[in-house]
Structures are given as C-alpha cells and as structure tokens.
Image: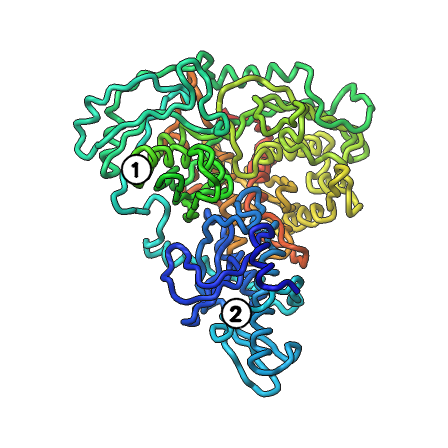
C-alpha cells in the first residue's frame, strides 16, 4: 500500500492523483472529493466522471467514462460527464490515430476500480465489516448479510483520506453490465436543442474578435499593410502583423514550424473583424516556388521511373513479365471540419489560459509555452468539444497566433477562421502517384512491387534521413514471398498533415484495387483470391516487432461477403466490389454494390464487417463506422484539392464537395463479437470505401478506375 502523502507527492510523475475539493472549469464549487483526476464525488450525491481525451465527434466523451463507470459500479443514468481540461497527471491525453480507447482502456478500468476499492475500504471502517464481505451496486457499498447500504457520497471524504491501492481488483469481464450496451452520446440532448457550447460559441468579458488576413500563396509573408479602408469598419479597433520570418527569410519561431503568418484585424464583434480583414490591403512577400497541381502530378508520375528509396524488400526472385503493371493517382485532400479553426486565449504576464478545440492538449500546452516563452506549468488548456477534426486540430497553428494576439492586446482574444481560410490554409493529405507490378502463381500472389512518388514530409524520415514507414506500407507485406516497397521524393511546397486514416486512406485504394485487378486477370473470384492470399495461418510475422493476425482479416472478408450476398446474381448494370484492410488496430472489409447508367452510377449499398475487439458502446461504434463510410464516400466521389500558381482554388462546400443526402447509400454494419481488448475504430472503416466502389464499377461496366476522385477517373 502507498500512504496518502507519498501518493500525492508522486502523483504528478505517475499520472494519477488524489486531491480534495478542487473545482473544475464550468462547475460550481460544491464540496467534493476527487478520488482520481477523472472522478469526483460531490456531497450532494452527484458523481462526475471526466472524459480524458478530446471529443471531436468520435464518441470518447461517452465511451471513456463508460469504462470508468463500469468499474466504479455506478448507475450510468445518474452520473454527470464533463470534458477534462489538460492535466499533466494524465497520460495519452490526445485524440488521434484511433488510439483514445485503445491506449486508455486499461487505465480507465484501473481508475474506476481504484476509486471503488477506496470507497469499499471506507465503508469497511464505518460498518466494522471486513472489505471482502462487502459489495458495490449503483453507487452504494452494500453489506449483503445485513442489507445495510452506504452511498458513495457519504463515504467519499473518508475514502479520500485512505491509502491508494497499488493493484485494485478489476471486475470479471463476464460481469460487465454497462460495457457492451448502447447509450446515447452524453451531449446528444444539448446538440439536438442547440445549446451545446463549441469553442466558436465561447464568450469572455472584454473579449476581442480577430480574423487574420492570410497570404493566398500559403507560406507567403506580409511585408506591410494599409488599413485605411479597414479602419472605417465600425467595431474595428486594432491591427497586428504576425510573421514567422523576418525580411531576410530567417525563421523567427524555429520550434513552431506550423505557425501561419498574416495580418490580424481585431474588433469588438465577428462581423467587423471579417469585414475589416476583407478591406485590408497587404503587400506580400511571395515564395519563389509556387506549385501547380497538374505539373506536380506529372512530376510524380515521371518520378516512378527513377530509382526509389527501398523501404522494404523480401525475397530476391526477379519478376520479368508481371501479370499487371498499373499506375494509380491519388489527390490532395483537405480536412474541412464543420467548425472552422478557432481559439480563445487570455494572457496575463507569464501565465496563459486557452480555450481550444484541440485534438492534442499536451502539444497545445507545449506550443503555447514555447511561443510565449513561459513555463509549461503556467499554461491552462480548456479542451472544448470540437465540431469535427479528422486530424486537422492535432496541430497548434490556430492556437499560437491567438495567444500572441492576447498577449499583445492584454485582454482575451478569440481568433476565428473563415471557411475559406480553413480550406486554403489546411495541412493536406499528400497527393501521390503509385505504381504496382504484381504476379500470381497457383491462385496466390507471388510477386509484388509497389512504388510511390510524392513530396516528403519530415515526419516520415528518421533522424538519419533514412526512410521509415513511409506511407505506412504494410499489407501485403508478410503474405508475398517476393515483395518490394519503394519511395521517390519529389520536392513541393504544399503543406502536409495527418488526414483521417493517414496514408492508409490512399494506400488501401492502391492495394485493394491491384488485388482485384490481379484476381480478374487470372479469372478468380475476388473474395476467393483474398482468402487464398490471407491463407490458413493465424499469425504472419510482418515485421520483427509486429505479428499480424491474418485469421481476423479473413473473418471480416468472409463476413462482409456473406452479409452482402456475394456470389448471388445481379441484374445487368449492377456490380459488387470488395476491399479490405488492417488500419489503426481494426480489421475491416467492405463490399460495395453499385448501379451503372449512361449518365454515371449510384452507390446502392455498402456492407461493412469490422473486428475492433470488444465494443464499448455499440451505438457509438456504429455511428463511427457510418461516419467513416460517408467521409470515405465523399472523398472517393468528389474529394480533390486543386493548386494553381501556389493558390488553393477550393474555398467552401460548393467547390470542395461532400456527399449530398441523395448520394448516401444503405450502410450495413456488422461487428465481429470479440472479448479481445478494444482497438481503434475511428479511421479503419474509411480506407476500403473507395476501392470497394471502383471494384464494383468494374464488375458492373468493365471499366477500371485508377484515378481519384472517381469523377476524374471516369472522365
């Protein structure tokens, strides 16, 4: 056992704490015991559980507290759930890579179990009954022998004074009553009634609103500005130039590479800030090199003939005459969350307080400390619910300019991005061109060569400059005896960033399309070809540190095919296509059914089979899958960022299209039942959508689509 004094002393280092009566932002300061940074029991009987990771529509604000509540043994209908602020005592407090539940499932169970054990220990003393004779149920400690019951509220203060157990007993999983049941999103009522507060809604006393006029050419820098017309806008109060480089091109903020410069217009209301920014006249220092998307894609394709950096090579048998030799083209994509970037900040001397819809509170706090030159412990980050993110809010650019302006103005400042700026100044999913040369023997792939040409991003290179997991090459590595993955970097200036499912969103299109082409080349049913490729072995050693459970991929392929009635006859003009992948911990297979017509095609149905381990909240999980399919469909049909002379041409939903309601197919979702630990789900359902559709179009029409979006591939 750890005594209470030592536990508090160690809490900052261990990521686990015990503090009494510390009010959280947004809550009234009622007397309460904090049995864990994520668990508070109020004297009024209210139990508040905090969602550790940022909520951006993926459901973790519901699912993570569900795990705590299960082990704490409380009635879900009686608790209150709040979003946790950034807390240095907590580990893995970010949302990205489908990791929120995957990384924190065990920690959330321990949190609930620890608090429950402390409450039982307090009850044991109060009732003079051994702990092993007591039970818990719905927020009470119960003595089954006598029927005596003590509420958690009556025990919390005493429990908080006890030693914290190092290894509290966990529930047996067969005894779960909440995990595995469907519950509504905890913010559903607020969202339905329009009272949900997003970051853009937040208002502070004496707050100014700011809009930054940004260079159309992305990384251009302001040299000077004329504010004569902007000053005439009622409500405009000030202007401030934000520069990441000086006139000689020297980077002023070397630790903040994603800082966006421009000229800020500060006003007393949103409209005035927007109108002032439109009327501001700025002289820009433009970059010498300015990309054009058509030229860039041509460079990518030409680079496929260059020698590649070899990322992986298995076997040495030469492929003289491949069965297929095909080239695929993938576009740049923007994130376009429904709520554009925004942030609110207040800076007072060497302290800063930030309200941000961030995916990554630790990075946000670090960035604020660096840009202001203050100690990290002096930064408070209030994590707001995000109106979508998809990887865009992982960065801190929209936070850094806000804190600089707040320091300059000595009052709270909210920086708002227009939809146009949000699209044109995004960090885009990399466009690329890929070539696959492959052959099969005896119904199984024997050779596979895959080469990608794109422009590099530092995150994909090891410190020594060698390629490392460039474009997340994995499957079919480990399944093909003779395999080569290669990468050819081509210089460009378009800023890159993580996009939902990262590079899997494009690679799965290439791999699943090429597998389908190879199957049809040999006259083999694509599902049978997939299953033959996967084989009978349970595990395949893909890398020295990674064993791939092939049996789970095979099961989702079989389930998706079965649920989609694969193999049954379809009318003329209809077709089915299948695609599959392992992504961020989930095994996913999808079958698309399409109808072709003279004027195009419709996607009628997408059947999804997913193995993501134990499902915490089936309703939330289904929502995740459906959302991933719809976003994957939007990207497949319409998604494309066009750059001319260094300027992104798209600016809003009229020219950066998302699917309309009439384009949404029936989405049929099936989960593999599993007692395995929960795995990632937010990204896995997206990548197979595009190849399942294009393979279905081939089945219906005989036309191969190797260029996305599909409207370009059909042209």
Question: Which residue corresponds to the image point at 56% horizontal and 86% vertical from the top-left?
Answer: 147
In this orientation, does residue 543 appear? yes
Q: Nearer the viewer, residue 518 or 402?
A: 402
Q: Nearer the viewer, residue 210 or 471?
A: 210
Residue at the far bottom in the pictured view: 146
Q: How far across and how far down the image is residue 686, in percent?
A: 55, 41
Q: Secondary structure at mark 2?
A: loop
Q: Secondary structure at mark 1?
A: loop
- Residue 410 is labelled as 1
Q: Is residue 79 above or below residue 349?
A: below
In this orientation, does residue 438 appear? no
> Where is residue 483, by image quadrant?
top right
> How many neighbours does mark 1 have within 10 angstroms: few (below 14), some (14-19), or many (20 or more)?
few
> How many neighbours does mark 2 have within 10 angstroms: few (below 14), some (14-19), or many (20 or more)?
many
Front disc: 1 or 2: 1
Q: How far across and how far down the image is residue 126, in percent?
A: 55, 80
Separation of disc 1 and disc 2 at Cα?
45 Å
Q: How far across and how far down the image is residue 643, in percent?
A: 44, 21
Question: Which residue corresponds to the image point at 47% horizontal and 17% vertical from the top-left?
Answer: 291
- Residue 74 is labelled as 2
> Where is residue 546, by image quadrant?
top right
Question: Which residue corresponds to the image point at 40% horizontal and 19% vertical from the top-left?
Answer: 220
Residue at the far front in the pictured view: 5
> Where is residue 82, by image quadrant?
bottom left
Q: Nearer the viewer, residue 129 or 277?
A: 129
Q: Is residue 389 above or below residue 497?
A: below
Counting residues from the N terminus, which is met first, the one under dot 1 or under dot 2?
Answer: 2
């Amino acid at each position: 056992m750890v005594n209470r004094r030592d536990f508090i002393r160690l809490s900052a280092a261990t990521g686990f704490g015990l503090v009494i009566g510390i009010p959280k932002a947004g809550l009234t300061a009622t007397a309460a015991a904090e049995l864990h940074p994520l668990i508070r029991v109020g004297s009024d009987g209210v139990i508040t559980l905090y969602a550790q990771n940022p909520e951006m529509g993926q459901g973790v604000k519901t699912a993570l507290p569900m795990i705590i509540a299960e082990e704490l043994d409380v009635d879900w209908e009686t608790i209150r759930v709040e979003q946790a602020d950034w807390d240095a005592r907590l580990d893995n407090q970010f949302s990205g890579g489908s990791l929120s539940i995957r990384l924190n499932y065990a920690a959330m169970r321990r949190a609930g179990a620890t608090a429950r054990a402390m409450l039982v220990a307090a009850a044991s003393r109060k009732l003079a009954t051994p702990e092993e004779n007591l039970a818990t149920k719905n927020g009470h400690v119960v003595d089954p022998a006598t029927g005596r019951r003590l509420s958690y509220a009556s025990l919390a203060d005493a429990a908080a004074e006890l030693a914290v157990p190092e290894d509290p007993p966990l529930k047996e999983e067969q005894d779960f009553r909440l995990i595995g049941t469907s519950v509504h999103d905890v913010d559903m009522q607020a969202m339905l009634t329009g009272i949900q507060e997003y970051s853009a809604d937040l208002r502070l006393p004496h707050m100014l609103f700011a809009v930054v006029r940004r260079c159309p050419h992305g990384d251009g820098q302001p040299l000077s500005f004329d504010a004569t017309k902007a000053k005439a806008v009622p409500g405009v109060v000030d202007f401030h130039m934000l520069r990441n480089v000086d006139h000689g091109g020297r980077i002023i903020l070397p630790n903040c590479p994603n800082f966006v410069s421009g000229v800020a217009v500060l006003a007393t209301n949103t409209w005035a800030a927007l109108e002032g920014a439109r009327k501001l006249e700025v002289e820009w220092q433009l970059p010498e090199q300015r990309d054009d998307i058509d030229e860039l894609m041509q460079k990518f394709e030409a680079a496929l003939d260059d020698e590649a950096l070899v990322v992986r090579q298995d076997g040495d048998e030469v492929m003289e005459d491949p069965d297929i030799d095909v080239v695929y083209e993938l576009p740049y994509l923007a994130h376009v969350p429904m709520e554009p970037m925004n942030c609110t900040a207040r800076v007072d001397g060497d302290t800063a307080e930030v309200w941000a819809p961030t995916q990554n509170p630790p990075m946000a706090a670090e960035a604020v400390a660096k840009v202001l030159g203050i100690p990290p412990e002096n930064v408070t980050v209030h994590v707001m619910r995000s109106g979508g993110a998809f990887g865009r809010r992982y960065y801190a650019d929209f936070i850094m300019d806000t804190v600089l302006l707040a320091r300059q103005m000595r009052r709270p400042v909210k920086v708002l991005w227009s939809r146009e700026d949000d699209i044109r100044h995004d960090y885009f999913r990399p466009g690329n061109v890929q070539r696959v040369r492959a052959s099969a023997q005896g119904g199984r792939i024997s050779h596979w060569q895959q080469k990608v040409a794109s422009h590099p991003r530092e995150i994909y290179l090891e410190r020594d400059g060698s390629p490392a997991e460039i474009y997340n090459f994995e499957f079919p590595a480990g399944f093909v005896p003779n395999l080569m993955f290669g990468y050819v970097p081509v210089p460009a200036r378009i800023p890159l960033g993580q996009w939902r499912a990262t590079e899997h969103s494009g690679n799965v299109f290439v791999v699943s399309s090429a597998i389908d082409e190879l199957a049809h080349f040999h006259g083999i049913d694509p599902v049978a070809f997939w299953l033959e490729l996967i084989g009978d072995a349970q595990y395949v050693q893909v890398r020295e540190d990674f064993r791939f459970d092939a049996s789970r991929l095979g099961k989702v392929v079989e389930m998706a095919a079965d649920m989609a009635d694969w193999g049954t006859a379809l009318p003329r003009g209809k077709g089915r296509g299948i695609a599959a992948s392992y992504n961020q911990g989930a095994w996913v297979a999808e079958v698309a059914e399409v109808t072709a017509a003279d004027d195009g095609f419709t996607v009628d149905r997408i059947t999804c089979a997913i193995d993501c381990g134990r499902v915490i909240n089936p309703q939330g999980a289904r929502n995740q899958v459906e959302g991933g399919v719809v976003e994957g469909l939007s990207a497949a049909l319409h998604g494309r960022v066009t750059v001319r002379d260094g300027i992104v041409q798209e600016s809003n939903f009229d020219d950066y299209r998302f699917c309309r309601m009439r384009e949404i197919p029936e989405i049929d979702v099936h989960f593999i039942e599993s007692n395995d630990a929960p795995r990632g789900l937010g990204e896995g359902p997206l990548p197979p959508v595009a190849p399942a559709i294009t393979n279905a179009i081939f089945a219906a029409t005989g036309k191969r689509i190797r260029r996305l979006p599909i409207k370009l591939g059909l042209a």
